[in-house]
Image (tube, rainbow, N blue to C red):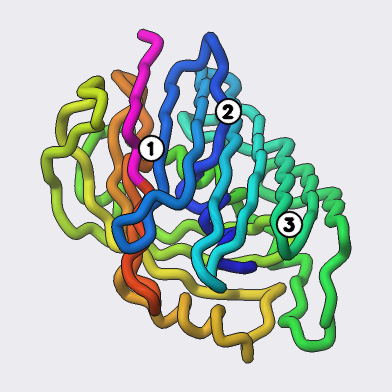
Amino acid sequence: MRLTALLLLTAAVLASPAAASDLYLKYKLYAVGLPIGSGVLSVDVGQEAYSIKGDGRTAAFGRLISDGKGTVQVSGGVGNGSPAPERYDFKMTSEDENGTISMEMKAGKVGKVAVNPPQNRMKERIKVTTEHKKGVLDPLTAALIPAPKGLVPEICNRTLKLFDGKERYNVHLTYKSRRKAKTSDGRFKGDVLVCGARYEPVSGHRPRRKSIQELASNTSLEVWLAPVGNRPYLFPLRASMKAPFGSLVIQAEKYKLSN
């Protein structure tokens, strides 16, 4: 179930198109080279406000990934060139579990959170403290990375502090390379930054759970960041990782920029 949720949310792969969106991306998800999911993403970002919306699904892949679909959206303001989330909503339906998360935020601080159904096994989980909910972003906003200097290596060398309504975790990015990339439709063709990524659980998780331990020790995670036209932001074009059963790849195949 964790892997299904991760695939539906990570790297903002799931989103829904908007006619006037600044950026529209259509992704496909592959496991060991086989297509097992898809999603579309729309991003609108201005000088004072932004929104990101998503809708996608996964197909069953053995016992590791179940049939699932999800929607996610976030909106907020923009201050000093950085997005500041104010409202985050996530809904997921799968063979194993259904659930929703709604979250209000202000200035990087989490306010009201509604999780339905509530988390179970709370005694086994690391407690999420008030301090853990300060100075954080939601997972979708974190994918819209400010890049006032463009494709420079230091964009990758950062730690993203995230809270998804249930769990607090860090994603450590490190610069690996700069390379050429393109989408299948040919609408994006250019340089991208290749960043290594490492997941670090902080709280809200069950530390003895095998999937958590495996993800935290996984050093194969990689994200390709591409420009959002001439706007001072980067967004994931591709994300990949090696799992126990083989490779997982999320790849943008369609790319449409409004202007």
Name the quadrant of the C terminus. top left
Q: In terms of sequence position, does the residue under pointer 2 or pointer 1 come before the other?
A: 2
Q: For label 3, count other residues whose C-alpha is less than 10 Å away and answer few (under 14), some (14-19) or many (20+).
A: many
Residue 35 x, y percent position in the rendering: 39, 49
Residue 194 x, y percent position in the rendering: 23, 51
Q: Which residues are magenta?
A: 251-259
Please, what is the dominant secondary structure of the magenta stretch?
A: strand
Q: Residue at x 46, y 48 (%)?
A: 11
Label 3–label 1 contact, CB within 8 A: no
- The residue beneath circle 3 is 165
- The residue beneath circle 2 is 16
Horizontal side of 227 relative to 114 (left or right) equals: left
* Residue 157 visible within the image: no
When the figure is inspected, residue 245 is found, relative to residue 104, above or below; the finding is below
Name the quadrant of the N terminus. bottom right
User: Which image quarter: residue 234?
Assistant: top left
Q: In terms of sequence position, does the residue under pointer 3 or pointer 2 come before the other?
A: 2
In reply to whether residue 133 is colored magenta, the answer given is: no
Please name which of the two marks, 3 or 2, marks the residue nearer to the observer.
Answer: 2
Residue 116 x, y percent position in the rendering: 87, 56
Q: For label 2, count other residues whose C-alpha is less than 10 Å away and answer few (under 14), some (14-19) or many (20+).
A: many
Q: Amino acid at mark 2?
A: Ser
Camera-side residue of 176 and 35 = 35
Camera-side residue of 26 and 237 = 26
User: Which image quarter: residue 118?
Assistant: bottom right
Q: Which mark is residue 235?
A: 1
